[in-house]
Structures are given as C-alpha cells and as structure tokens.
Image (tube, rainbow, N blue to C red):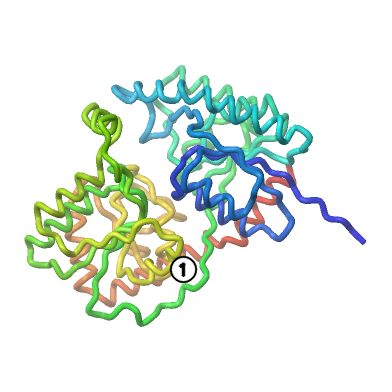
Amino acid sequence: MVHFMSKNILYIHHSPVFGGASRSLLEMIKAFPSHEVEPYFICTKGSASEQFITVSNKICSTFGISCFDHTRFGHYTGRRWFILLREILFIFPTLFVFAKAFFKWRKIKFTAIHVNDLVLLPAVLISKFLFKAPIVLHSRCLFENKKGVFRLWLIKKIVDKNVDVIVAIDSDCHKDIKDFFCSKSIVIHNGLCVYDNKITDEKSDDDFIVGFVGNMLPSKGIYELAGAAVKLKELGHDDIVFLIVGPKVNNNVSLRSKALDYFGFRELTSEKIDKVITDNNLDNIVFSGFCTDIEEQYKKMSVLAFPSRLNAVGRPVFEAAYYRVPSIVAVDNPTYDTFIPDVTGLQIKQNDINDLVEKILKLKNDHEFLQELGEGAFSMTEKFYNINNNAKKMLSVYDNL
C-alpha cells in the first residue's frame, strides 16, 4: 500500500477583508486534489481568516501584518508616505505572529511558503529566515517599475535573493515584472469555482440590473457608480437598478476615522454614498452586503460595472463572465487574457461618469449586443480561468521547487 505524503504549504496573507486576493487563494486550495496539500496560514484577523478556517485549522493570526507597497496605485508618494508609519508599527505584531507560528510548527517541513501578495516583502524576509523553505510570491497588482530608484533597488535585491518563483495573475501584471526580477516569473491565472452558471428565469427581459462587486472603496470606482445612478435618474432612467455586492467599509464612524478621512488617508466611503442616495432620493440602489452565495447575485445582473481607478481588470469581471454577464471596465490597453473591448464588454475612460452612463444605456437599449458580449466574456473566461487547470499548474510549481 502506497502512503501519500501531503505537501505542507505555509500561506501568508495580510488583508483582513475577504476580497479578491483571499477568495482566489481559498478557491485554489479547495481545487487541489484531496490530501495533496496541507495548508497552514499566517494572516490578519477578519473576514478573510474566518473563511480560511473552512480549509484548515492550522492558523496563526494577528491584527496587522506589515507591508511595503510599491504597486502602481498604492506606492508611497506625497501624503501616502505617512501610511508607511502604520507599516512600521505593524512590524511588532508581524514579528510576534511569525515567532508564534515558528514555535508552533517548528517540526513541520514546509514544501513551500506561499506569500499571497508582492507587497508582503517584510514577510518574505522573516519567513525565509525562520522556515528556510522555498518561496512562491504572488503578484496580484500592477507593479510600479519606474518610480523610486532606491525602492526598486531594494525590492529587487530582496526578491532576487529570497524568492524562487513569482506568479503573476495575468499578462497585465506579468509585463511589469518579467524583465525586472531575476527570479523566474510565470503567469497562472486565478481560478474561478463556479457551481452553477446556468442562466435562470430569475431575471426578466424588462429588468436591467447594473452590478458592482467588491469592497466599497474609492479605488474600486464606487463614487463613479453612484454618480452614474444620479445622472441616469436625471435623464429619466431610474428604472435601472444598481446592485452593490460587498461589505461597507465603515459602518461605525469614529473620531479616528473622521481624522483619517480629513487628511486623505482613509475615506468614509459608505457614509458619503449614503448621503448621495439621500440627497438625490435614489431608491434604485440595492445593497446585498457581504455574500457567500455570490453566484446568486451574478445571476441577477444584466451587466457588471467595473469603473476602477486602478487601471486593471479585477476578479469580478471574470466571475461575472462565467454567468455570461459582460462588463463595463475602466482600463487602458487591456491584455488578451483580461478584457477585449467590444468582445467581452465595453471599455470606458477612468473617472468619467458620462462615459459610464453612455455605455450602460447602450447595452440597455441593445439586448442582442448585450447577449453577444456575454457569450464573448464566457468564452474568454472558460479558456483562461478554469479552476482545475490552474490549480494543477500551481501544484506543478510546488513540485518543481
């Protein structure tokens, strides 16, 4: 009888909120064949850690893990340098949770350490020092490879010395890192776990529902979406429903939150959106809150709006495509494996409410074109984002370390 040995993989994740990165990681782990991987987690407490418990009870968590952000959208410039103070303070809980994990799992031989975002450079250094295992580093955002000469030198030094493989989630992310790091970089697309993508009769031809999936953050384009709802009402199209799927980020407004909002470090997004709704008597915006059955929300949508300020195509676009829901996306020069204008959806300019309104009305008034785009989106997602195929590719990475 052959006894199969599982691969012990230590996963490191920093964001407390269950969002695109944590969902992608979780669904990849769930797609691994039974007993192929034994997952261990070092993570921040929150809705993400609560979901990780569904696949492992081997979790060490803390209230903050230190990062160093040099992504194109989040890199330190101007007042954003003050955010680095938070990351310096987070060094202490980071060191504590890693020390706790080390003493708890010191007898475990890890096949790999999987660091779930390129911003987790302190975790790369600490985990390499403590656990002495090969490191797989996920690149999930566009990397800023031009600004900050010293920062780029330091990041390159850390990655080249400590990381064995960098995994980019698509060609868009890959083009920023492939010529910069000496470490081997590859593309493995996020996999999507779809239980039932059949079109139901839940949605009638008279309904036109614009979906938005994600945390209610300015970077996700939530203000542009609210602005489009106001504009459409002014134009007499208040029959168009906006379905917002995701948690509100500031249900309790504290003095600290107001101070951070005033200085521009964190916006009271939910409060501001609520004010827009009240001031304009909008009764066509529906909040679903955090959903574990997100597929049911996609089935209700006519089109997904992704008016992000990040100049990148996010996971909701691919998820919606599996339900033959096309997207309206704010992105410049998208790559072939993320978004094809007029084939998988419609392209808009960033921070342009009028452009978003125009594209919504275009699809509302052309049902045949809407369906055509939905089929195009489904075809592309099926080709690149098959969960089982992409999970096998990641297992192959672990095997070859």
Q: For numbered disc 1, what is the local secondary structure?
A: helix
Instruction: Answer above or below: position of 226 versus 137.
Output: below
Q: In what quadrant of the picture does the C terminus appear?
A: top right
44 horizontally vs 271: left or right: right
Percent of width and height locating residue 362: 20, 67
Amino acid at circle 1 = Ser
User: Does 243 sit above or below residue 55?
Assistant: below
**Outermost residue, top side:** 150
Q: Which residue is mark 1?
A: 379
Tell me what residue is drawn at x 16 percent, y 52 percent.
Answer: 227
Q: Quadrant of residue 357?
A: bottom left
* Residue nearest the observer in this picture, 198 or 294: 294
Left or right relative to 388: residue 241: left
Q: Quadrant of residue 338?
A: bottom left
Is the residue marked by circle 1 packed among few (<14), some (14-19), or many (20+) residues within 10 Å?
some
Where's the N terminus, which quadrant?
A: bottom right
The residue lying toward the viewer, choosing from 292 and 184, is 292
Residue at the image point whose x is 33% and y is 24% from the top: 77
- Residue under the image location 43 percent in, 54 percent down: 315
Residue 298 placement (x, y as % from top left)? 38, 67
Residue 349 lies, with reference to residue 344, above or below; the image says: above
